[in-house]
Image (cartoon, helix red, strand yellow):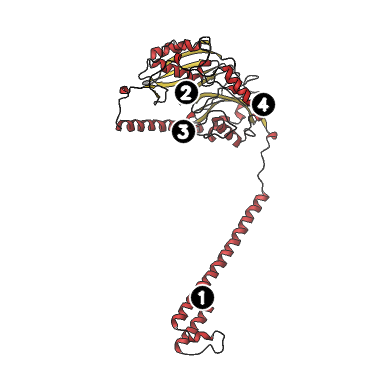
Amino acid sequence: MSDFIRRIVTKMKAVSTGTNIIGNNKNSSYVNWSKEQLIRRITELENANNQDTNKSRHVEDSKKRKLSQEQIIKNKTKKPLKKFDFSKHNTRFIALRFAYLGWNYNGLAIQKEYTPLPTVEGTILEAMNKCKLVPSMVLQDYNFSRCGRTDKGVSAMSQVISLKVRSNLTDEEQLDPANDCKEIPYVHVLNQLLPDDIRISAVCLRPPPNFDARFSCVHRHYKYVFKGENLDIDKMSKAASYFLGEKDFRNFCKLDGSKQITNFKRTIISSKILPLSGTFYCFDLIGSAFLWHQVRCMMAVLFLVGQALEEPEVVLHLLDIERTPRRPVYDMADDIPLLLYDCKFPQMKWQEPAVDDYKAIKFTTATEALTLHYELKATVCNIFKDVLPTADSSKLSKTVINLGDGKGKIVGNYLKLKERSVMESVEVVNAKYFKRKDKKSK
């Protein structure tokens, strides 16, 4: 109890005994107060005293925090972060081979505009920038090139990029393979920073002269996975064989006026329907180069043949540009089952990381865990399907066009491709884009 409160209590006792100890003090009015009034007053004074004490404590704590913050700022000022100077480090031109599952990404290529999902390249380059392998996210800063651009949802098992990165070795040391063990372990360094659905599989430390990941590629190998139920695989195989050779594929792609493409001839080296495990098959396709959405458009037509909605010869009809100069309107196949399986390059010496060290085992375990994750989800989905009532889709009076996504597109009466309305010609699409671009520049 404070001295001030103690004096008040003494006064209260004096009042209760009738003793006048206040005399001529200016607070002598307390003499006439009742015991209850004095108690109430003491309570008020105690509360006020506590508030003053708390306020003093808060002020003191605030001062301590301020001093602490000032000390932190002072320490930071004393020890500024040293900026990484790329000009003081060696660089070398390399190629990286990598795989990714595409359904969590907004395609391969990094974009200037905002995308709802990250891109694969953006994720890789952020990792490279973080560990100071590249100086920025600007592709022109390090001679960047990609092999096969994949769209949103599409996966790749052997994608390739080439670029200039930081090196531990001088230009002279880089020429001797004996020094490779001294080089930055690019594969391990990047895999430690990348998510489990993107994996660097190999590095080429000495690509051939004038190598470019896009233009040095000899051929690209795609696979489109699908379920074979209710599909005529023999007819699909026959239709797929018509794609072989050099053909004009303008009716099997999506036109892009920004590219101003006039030559739609592409060479297909191999085109087959191959069995996979269970009831699954894949459209196995190898070609020198491909147009935008070409594989998905080819697969969409193969689905129509497999459902007996079209004959295999419809492929020949669409490849005949004189008879069919403009593409009929049709939906392309789904993106998820498509994957860029391989990219072939001449004279490439790929170096894969050791498979028996701790890091390799760690990455393998992570990949196995990811695979199990999706297998468990698939199993749970099958149980989910089994416990629900199942409708007989064969009794549906309408046609469901297979698009590879399991849902398809429901149509009333199927209209043959030869009878459908057609899209704008290549010349019109290119002219419209050029006109829009010219108008924006003025």
Q: Earlier in the sequence, mark 4 or mark 2?
A: 4
**Vertical arrangement, residue 58 with respect to residue 123, above or below:** below
Residue 222 x, y percent position in the rendering:
49, 19
The alpha-carbon separation of the residues under discs 4 and 2 comes to 42 Å
Crowding around mark 1 (Cα neighbors within 10 Å: few <14, some 14 to 19, many 20+) is some
Residue 219 x, y percent position in the rendering:
55, 16
The residue sitting at the right extreme is: 87
Residue 84 x, y percent position in the rendering:
66, 38
Q: Earlier in the sequence, mark 4 or mark 1?
A: 1
Q: Nearer the viewer, residue 373 or 335?
A: 335
- Amino acid found under the numbered disc labelled 2: Leu
Crowding around mark 4 (Cα neighbors within 10 Å: few <14, some 14 to 19, many 20+) is some
Label 1 sits on a secondary structure element that is: helix
Q: Nearer the viewer, residue 153 or 10?
A: 153
- Amino acid found under the numbered disc labelled 1: Leu
In the rendered image, which residue does mark 4 sit on?
A: 173
- C-beta proximity under 8 Å, tags 4 and 2: no
- Residue mark closest to the camera, 3 vs 2: 2
Q: Nearer the viewer, residue 72 or 434?
A: 434
**Vertical arrangement, residue 323 with respect to residue 99, above or below:** above
Residue 310 x, y percent position in the rendering:
41, 14
In the rendered image, which residue does mark 2 sit on?
A: 338
Q: Which mark is residue 366?
A: 3
- Residue drawn at (46%, 77%) of the image: 40
The alpha-carbon separation of the residues under discs 4 and 1 comes to 84 Å
Label 3 sits on a secondary structure element that is: helix
**Vertical arrangement, residue 108 with respect to residue 327, above or below:** below
Q: Is residue 101 visible?
A: no
Crowding around mark 2 (Cα neighbors within 10 Å: few <14, some 14 to 19, many 20+) is many
In the rendered image, which residue does mark 1 sit on?
A: 45
